[in-house]
Image (tube, coloured by chain):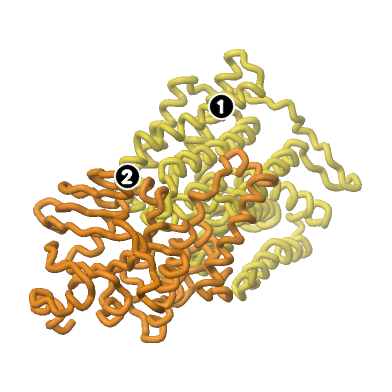
Amino acid sequence: MDMNERKIGDVILALDNISLSFGAMKVLDDISFDVRQGEIRSIIGPNGAGKSSMLNVINGFYHPQEGSITFRGEKRKEMDVHKAAASGIARTFQNIALFKGMSTLDNIMTGRNLKMKCNIFQQAWYWGKAQKEEIEHRQKVEEIIDFLEIQNIRKTPVGRLPYGFQKRVELGRALAAEPDILLLDEPMAGMNVEEKEDMSRFILDINDEFGTTIILIEHDMGVVMDLSDRVVVLDYGLQLADGPPDEVRSNQTVIDAYLGVSH
Amino acid sequence: MRIERDIIYIILAFIVLMVVVPWTAGQLSDQIFFNWPFFFEVAIGGLLSGVMYSLIALGFVLIFKASGVFNFSQGAIVLFAALTLVGLHGLGLPMWLAIVATMGVMFLLAVSIERLVLSKLVNQEPIILFMATIGIAYFLDGFGQTLWGSEVKVLNLGISEAPGFYFDGLILINDFDLFAAGIAAVMVVGLAIFFQYTRIGRALRAVADDHQAALSVGIPLKHIWIIVWTVAGLVGLVAGIMWGSKMGVQFALSLIALKALPVLILGGFTSVPGAIIGGLIIGAGEKLAEVFLAPMIGGGIEEWFAYMLALAFLVFRPQGLFGEKIIERV
């Protein structure tokens, strides 16, 4: 893929001076960075650096004590989970959070939840409008299933799937919401090289074909440096660096704190 | 559905216990009367009373499926619904209007439970929520009887209890039991479709599996809980109407919930069809045991037979007939 052909637009999400603590423990300390429309933005750092907390702030699970979040030009103190989902922020979780008793298809269908409009009475009746709506959304879900190449596990309860596939289904559920911003929390953790290559390809395709902005947390430096447009580095809640991969890679503080040490 | 080997064993064991043993007993002992029409009459009578157990069990399954919480207060909900219905009817409302009004009350109850109790307990351990439902149970028992009085009340739907269905003059079946069975069948089909094929049904199951993930795809936890407690309230109302017109509306209604426990263990806590099949097995099992086995060991089997059956299930198939097998990955 030619990087020059991709369109990276204006700032869609800006985080300014975000601080978050739980009791006496400071998890994020004065973090500021922005995300541009259509870019792949990575957050790296050792375990406990505050990367997942950062994602939780962005989708509204955590409410920071200080700082502001500007999303699509609207400045606010914190995000609300439901509003975040409704305004196009979808995510995956570090420890897969799928609905384990449900099939792949049903899991991905839950991602369409906010796009479906039938009310409770129409649903209780089911036949007619609600059924028609089901079928329409089912089509979109089938496209996602094709895209992620998981046709053959469509009806399998996800609790029975191998780990790599569960990660894919979770990505599918997030994609089903047709998000503008996709938050991926270690999508390749615990995968073998082949699975990582597949997942990298999916991430690039999502970004390229749908123009989705991606915020990625990942430990595999090779993958991060290959995929990302810009990288922000956190360490114990502090922001060490922010910039394009090459710049971050050669930053001495980063090398000392993170890259130089083997993990 | 793939039929597993132990299900076949269970069916075989049940046939031996319920058919072969009574038949043999009938041949060997002159204390036990056995002929096939009588056997079927007892069996059908048992199945129909099993439907009544299923109605109670359904309320448990709904809340368990949608929030992973064992709702101890389902029995109290049944009592509260029946008391409210009889009370409103007693105030002069016609029966149909009283039923509609009680449905409204069950909705308000669901909203209050969500507002006052559940919303404070998001992301808590299931045991905490379970304890909360015990509190709700005691409150509802007391509140309902304070409002409407604690004496036994008559609830008459105007359906005859006389045997209305004859099969060749040999098998007698009660009209009322057939009516209850019909209602239960409609409810089960409706709920199964709702849970399996609609967005809200899917959202209910999603919330049961993972609160956080459900929130992240924009499922509003609050609405889901109100919906599921309302549905449990409506199922409770139907159970209350059926049981109330059978045994009078009184505090004992709250205790028949205990009869639902063996049904749940048999059918599996997460399965709507399981609640039905479990109820049928328990209902038929205890009647057949009482009539054909009890004389051999001195009678009184009906009281504890269901619990023994449940115990046997806990040993050999803890997830029940249709429950989801819970495998924790380490």
Q: Are marks 1 and 2 on the same chain?
A: yes
**For the residue marked with disc 1, what is the amino acid?**
Thr
Q: Is residue B50 visible?
A: no
Q: Residue furthest top?
A: B92
Residue A39, disc: none
Q: Residue at x 40, y 37 (%)?
A: B114
- The chain that appears orange in the image is A
Do tag 1 and tag 2 residues touch (Cβ < 8 Å)? no
Which one is nearer the viewer's eye here, B245 or A250? A250
**For the residue marked with disc 2, what is the amino acid?**
Leu
Chain B as rendered: colour = yellow
Which one is nearer the viewer's eye here, A201 or B16? A201
Secondary element type, mark 2:
helix
Q: How many marks?
A: 2
Q: Picture coordinates of residue A240 (x, y %)?
A: 12, 67
Instruction: Classify the position of the C terminus of chain B by image quarter.
Output: bottom left
Give the vertical position of B4 relative to A131 (above or below): below
Residue wearing tag 1? B102
Instruction: Classify the position of the N terminus of chain B by image quarter.
Output: bottom right
Q: Is residue B99 visible?
A: yes
* Relative horizontal placement of residue A183, taking residue A254 as reference (left or right): right
* Relative horizontal placement of residue B242, taking residue B67 as reference (left or right): right
Q: Label 1 is found on which chain of the structure?
A: B
Q: Picture coordinates of residue B127 (x, y %)?
A: 34, 51
Secondary element type, mark 1:
helix
Q: Residue at x 58, y 43 (%)?
A: A118
Q: Picture coordinates of residue B311 (x, y %)?
A: 50, 61
Q: Residue at x 75, y 50 (%)?
A: B44
The residues bearing labels 1 and 2 have C-alpha atoms spaced at a distance of 27 Å
Q: Characterize the local packing of mark 2: few (<14), some (14-19) or many (20 or more) Cα atoms within 10 angstroms.
A: some
Give the vertical position of A108 relative to B214 (above or below): below
Residue wearing tag 2? B121
